[in-house]
Image (tube, coloured by chain):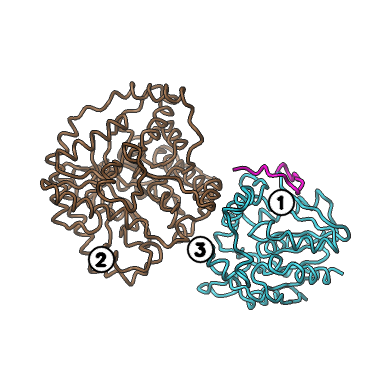
Amino acid sequence: MKVYQFTEQPYYPAWNDHSGSLRVNLLNRKCDPRIAADLFHRYYDEWQLSDELDLDIMLNEHHQTATCMSSTVVVGLSVLSRITRKARLLVLGYPIGHRQDPLRVAEELSTIDVISRGRLDMGFIKGVPYEFPASNQNPVGVMDRFWEALDFIIKAMTTHDEMFNWEGEYFNYRQVNVWPRVWQEPHPPIWTTTGSTTQARILGERGYVMATLGSGYNTRPLYDSYRRGHLAKWGKAPGPDRFAYLGLVAVAHDKDEARKRGDLVAGYLRSSSIVHVPFRNPPGFLAVEDNARLLRGQTPPRSYTKDRRVIDMRSAGVDELIAAGILFCGTPDEVYDQIVDFCDYCGGMGNLLMMGHAGFLTHEQTVDNLTLFAREVYPRLKAWKQPDAAEVAAQAVAAAQKAPASPGASARAGDLVDATIAAR
Amino acid sequence: MSLTAESEAPALAVNGTRIDMIERGSGPPLLFLHAENGIEPALAAIDELAKGARVIAPTHPGFGRSELPRGMRSVDDLSYFYLDMLDQLDLRDLTVVGVSLGAWIAAEIAVKSAARFARLVMANAVGIKVGDRETRDIADIFALTEKEFIEIAYCDPARGTRDYKSLPDAEVLAAARAREATARFAWNPFFHNPRLKSRLHRIRIPTLFLWGTHDRMLSEAYGRAYCALIAGARFELIDRAGHFPDHEQPKAFAAKVLAFAE
């Protein structure tokens, strides 16, 4: 198993000083650039430590928000390509649904792949709902734009012997020839996210790495749908390396300290949902049928514990979050057991996206959290034997034949935790 | 949830796209183009108009139960759709009445060809940019809750308030479709076409602007500036109405339209 250390690089000093919205319309007057600089350097230091601890690294970007200062992920990728040595650098995600220029995306990421000497993992998402007012891209039709941009980026990265032309529905280019050429052939690995079984199958057919967040003990149907799509298209079961799960992690030798850390890291879930109400669900982000249900006041339950209790991860306490597989928290032994239990439930999961820092967790606590995890949990996770992929995929096919999938939630690719916020 | 409720609107296919279209009343033909809130809120006004005209009221592609042709995403596209529809139905000497988004569509049709139009009525019309680049002409309705929107769009907010829990499924789905379709056509540039203003001089038919006095999504000054761009256009107010005067004051709205059409 691989483990990617992730922080949203929050500007947490503003978290207790807002008027009901941490995102989009929290005025930047609240941001002291001196404090922001200190925080950026601190977060880069912690990622350097992750590199030294043999952890991989995940970055993301958000816009106009105190929850995540990284507004252009390529800056963080640039810094880390230079100051880290071994870690994979995963961007999850690059919100191409918000970007006007996929050629620029292909150029940026090719450059990062070269500077890092082939350590880039490219996670593409459509972008979160509440940032459409900021980018002013139309949320209606965003998935069409997402797929066209993705197809273009792949073509731009894999075309070496001729220039090409692209006159699509959304993007127009005439003389495409990206320099520098990507390091990894044919292109850096592609990742994306989803909360929908329909999309999961499509991702399986495409063979991309599929990540979910907050899906907890509701993850298996997504993975199984991916497995069926992969098996049908490629004739073989996808290995655990095709699956990724974003889990919050808080480890300490002392149980009370671990819980304290778990509560601080869960601040990510609580702060994420503090968004000016009209921005949460822009038109077109969800299907009209889902929006009609929301108008009627029907909101689907979101997270489940292993014993099928429904929880709301934005307000849940540490115990509930642990029971739901959203937070892995405790002593190194406990955290190891929780993660293995969860991966076993998933039928195999090969990439833990570890939120080892969030919110008010201090630098010292973060360093200790990462170090303990890397030394006392990670080696055992690497040694853990994943379930047999072929057997699991065969079970997934058999289960679908027995009980055909009901038309499920219509969340679309690129939805992460944020689609659930929209429904609030 | 489905759109299978019994329909009082017969379907019409234009270039293979099926849309709903109400036809009511008799007399000189009148094309009614509904606002971004859909056809339902306009039904009372359509009934009033039908007392003095043969009203033809399509539900725009993407709204209500009307299909949306693949690739359609601008008011420019909608205007060509309606030019084809007018040819297909061979409508002539039309009084064309549009409210808000519907008025924008009417203007986009008229600058291309007003050959089938006798006159034009533009009620609380959107579609152009009036102020400078840092002045917002049109309230950012997507940054408002529905309650906040109703407060600026209606003279009497109770008129615009809907209890979705008690409405039929088809109407709730139509409300969700109306919101998505509005964004499809008006998200960016926001409720206007930067090219339209320089084309309005091509409208040379009698034109009447109607303006609900309590519209706080659009200002009366915006309406008067729009009106001044069409030669000879008149401007009249409708009292105790906001952004949707057809919905809030259907009788007064229809009376002014029919008087203009005589």
Q: Point out the image quarter for the C terminus of chain A.
A: bottom left
Crowding at dot 1, Cα within 10 Å, few <14 / some 14-19 / many 20+, comes out as some
Task: Kindly check if marks 3 and 1 are in contact, taking CB atoms under 8 A apart as contact.
Answer: no
Where residue B138 sits: x, y (%)?
57, 69
The furthest residue to the right: B27
Q: Is residue B168 magenta?
A: no
* Residue located 60% across and 51% down the image: B172
Where residue B187 sits: x, y (%)?
55, 59
Labels 3, 2: one chain: no
Q: CA distance from mark 3 to mark 2?
A: 28 Å
Subunit that carries the residue with mark 2: A
Where residue B173 sits: x, y (%)?
60, 49
- Say which chain is brown: A
The answer to whether one can see residue A43 in this image is yes
* Residue located 24% across and 52% down the image: A265
Q: Point out the image quarter for the N terminus of chain A.
A: top left
Labels 1, 2: one chain: no
- Please give the residue where the numbered disc 2 appears in the rendered image: A13
- Say which chain is cyan: B
- Please give the residue where the numbered disc 1 appears in the rendered image: B81
Task: Kindly check if marks 3 and 2 are in contact, taking CB atoms under 8 A apart as contact.
Answer: no
